[in-house]
Image (tube, grey):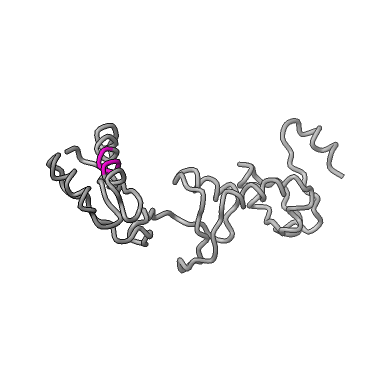
Amino acid sequence: MRHSQNRIYITGHMNPDSDSICAAIGYADLKSRISHDHYIASRAGDISPETAWVLNHFHLSEPYLLTDVLPKVADAEIQKIAGVSPDATVKQAWRVMHQQDVSLLPVLSPDNKLLGILSLKDLSVAYMDSLDTHALAHARTPYHMIADTLNGHILHPGTGAVDKDGYIIIGAGDLEAIRSSVR
C-alpha cells in the first residue's frame, strides 16, 4: 500500500444492498490505485444476508462501518496563518494573502485577539471604492499608508497626516507636468 496524505471513505446509501456495498469496494480500490490518496470502502448500515454471501464467495471483508458522516472539527484541515493589524493597508493585506495562498485573513489586535476576518471580496470592494476620488478622505487614510501602497514617498505632507478634503495628487513623471496639475 502506498503512503498517502488523505484517507477518504467511499460509501453507498443507508441500509446498503449488494450493489451499494460492491460499488463502494470497487470504487475505493480503483481510486486508491490511480491517486495518491487512500480510499477506504465503507458502509452506512448492516450487511444483508445476500451481501454477506457475496462477500464470503469472493473472499472479501465487510467494508468499514461508518456510523456518523457529519463533519467534526477534528476532520477539518486547520492552517495556521499570520494575521494583519487593523491599520494594515490593502496592499499589505493582499501581500500576506498572496504569500500564504489564502482567501481569508484574520485581523488581530496587538495582543493577538481576533477582531475580524478580511476576505478577498473585502479587498475587491476596497479596490473598487478606491476609484471614488473621495474614498481616501472618507476613510481618513493616513498619507504614509498611501505612500506605502504606491511604493512612493511624501514630498510635502502638508499640515496633517490624514487627508480631510479628499483631494490628493499623486505625481509620477515630469515635475513640471505635476506642478501644472496642482491647484
Report the residue at 82% width, 38% height from top. 179
Magenta residues: mostly which secondary structure?
helix
Q: Is residue 172 above or below residue 115?
A: above
In the image, residue 24 lies in the stretch drawn in magenta: yes
- Residue 43 at what x, y percent from top left? 28, 52
Residue 161 horizontal side relative to residue 108, left or right: right
Residue 80 horizontal side relative to residue 18, left or right: right
In the image, the segment drawn in magenta is: 22-26
Residue 3 horizontal side relative to residue 115, left or right: left
In the image, residue 109 lies in the stretch drawn in magenta: no
- Going by the picture, which residue comes out furthest to the front? 50
Report the residue at 79% width, 48% height from top. 133
Report the residue at 87% width, 45% height from top. 183
Q: Quadrant of the N terminus?
A: top left
Q: How many marks?
A: 0
- Residue 59 at what x, y percent from top left? 12, 41
148 or 17, nearer to the observer: 17
- Residue 12 at what x, y percent from top left? 33, 48
- Residue 75 at what x, y percent from top left? 34, 57
181 or 45, nearer to the observer: 45
33 or 41, nearer to the observer: 41
Residue 138 horizontal side relative to residue 16, left or right: right
Res. 22 image quadrant: top left
Report the residue at 27% width, 34% height from top. 30
Res. 159 image quadrant: bottom right
